Image: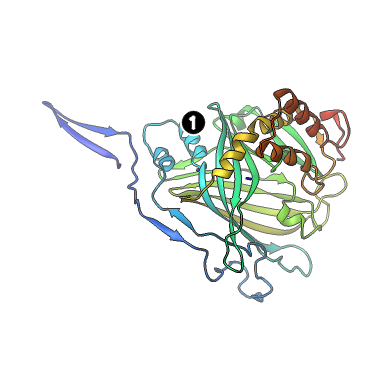
Amino acid sequence: MNIKRLIYGIAAAGFTAMLIVCSSAYAADSSNILENQPKSQPYVFAWQFADSDAMKPRGGDSKGVPVTLDTKPSDAWLKLQQLCIGSYERDRRAILAMVGEFRVSFDFVEVAGFTDNYKPAVPYRNWATEKVYVLEDSGKHIVLQHVLLSQSIAADGTVEKPVLTKHWRQDWQYEPKQVLVYRGHNAWQSRAVPESERKGAWSQTVYQVDDSPRYGGVAVWQHLSNFSSWNSPDTWRPLPRREYTVRDDYQLLMGNNRQIILPTGWVHEQQNNKVVLDSNAQPQVLNAVIAREFGFNRYERITGFDFSLADAYVKNTEPFWSEIRKQWAELTSQGKPIQLRSAPDKGMLYLPVVTYADGMSEGKQRSAKEISGYAKKAVQDYLAEKGGASAKPSY
């Protein structure tokens, strides 16, 4: 199984006129370099006086095959730098600049603690090769799907088979009337977005690997000549796999996330508080925050990597995943609380839909009617009670 320059022309015809041609102001360097993983681990900031062995990052122990970085500014970046385009179109170009083929590094480190006898958690680090696809683009609504396709080198030097994983999805909506938010303890609900908040803004809604909900936020893109960034307000999020697999002392990430577009890729920054919730899905009265972490995920454009398995997966499974998206959209658009039986990946709720998609990826033929029926039942099976969006949450 298994992405110029500002030309000033001076014309004389009995008078002098300046012609400004709307084109990119960025000069491209077409050189490529071959990048291997570093021989030694780079410095991790924030804890200079901690024992180095105790703070050795976990994760990312495998070594990936060499990749070729694309060091010239991308076409998407050049289009983003063009003059004479409105803010809406520049926003769209910034979002679409996240599409393509990337080497990705994931880094998370706790930077502050708020409990007695606090000891910082071991930092987390990982890597991947990843392609970001455009699944939908209707102008004001853009759907981007991330797919991991990583290939490692074994200890004996042999190249292992590529491993494909449907990763997270991000939906962008211009001036949204509502946004999906996390309520804690596996509950979600759409909230209305006031007109004053949505004017000129975009919502980013993030979904899990199985297209179940994760979190959403609303903010305005910021553009400063060669800088484009979208920064969410603080939002609630369930624990990611990197956390819940190693600890159970808190239930909520409360923080913001920022997308910054670069000439040769983009970065995803996070600043999160780790929060303890009470049984009513509210931050507990005393000692609610146990720690604060920073996250930095770097997406660097690559060239020449074989993503054909990922391309085939997206093509073959899209009829099914589009139905899954449709079912979740119908549930969340009603504005009623949605309570899941458990965290989708922690409770293995995702397994039936992922297995079904794998079958289609491997060539199993499904009729549109069969796909639609299975998708509807699969999404209903996530809910804590039968009856769809009317299921009562625990908070």
Please state which of residues 168 and 189 is positioned toward the viewer in this rendering.
Answer: 168
Q: Position of residue 63 (x, y in %)?
A: 58, 63
Instruction: Find disc 1 in the rendering and name its residue.
Output: 88
Please state which of residues 389 and 254 is positioned toward the viewer in this rendering.
Answer: 389
Decide: is 281 above or below 152: above
User: Which picture quadrant has residue 357?
Assistant: top right
Q: Position of residue 352 (x, y in %)?
A: 78, 40
| Label 1, residues with CA under 10 Å away: few <14, some 14-19, many ≥20 | some
Please state which of residues 65 and 171 is positioned toward the viewer in this rendering.
Answer: 65
Callout 1: helix, strand or loop? helix
User: Which picture quadrant has residue 384?
Assistant: top right
Decide: is 157 above or below 9: below
Q: Can residue 304 be seen at all in this image of the molecule? A: yes
Q: Position of residue 110 (x, y in %)?
A: 67, 62
Decide: is 277 above or below 392: below
> Which residue appears at 50% of the width and 34% of the height?
92
> Which residue appears at 48% of the width and 50% of the height?
301
Q: Position of residue 209 (x, y in %)?
A: 69, 43
From the viewer's perspective, tell me whether residue 332 is left or right of residue 50: right
> Which residue appears at 44% of the width and 40% of the height?
76
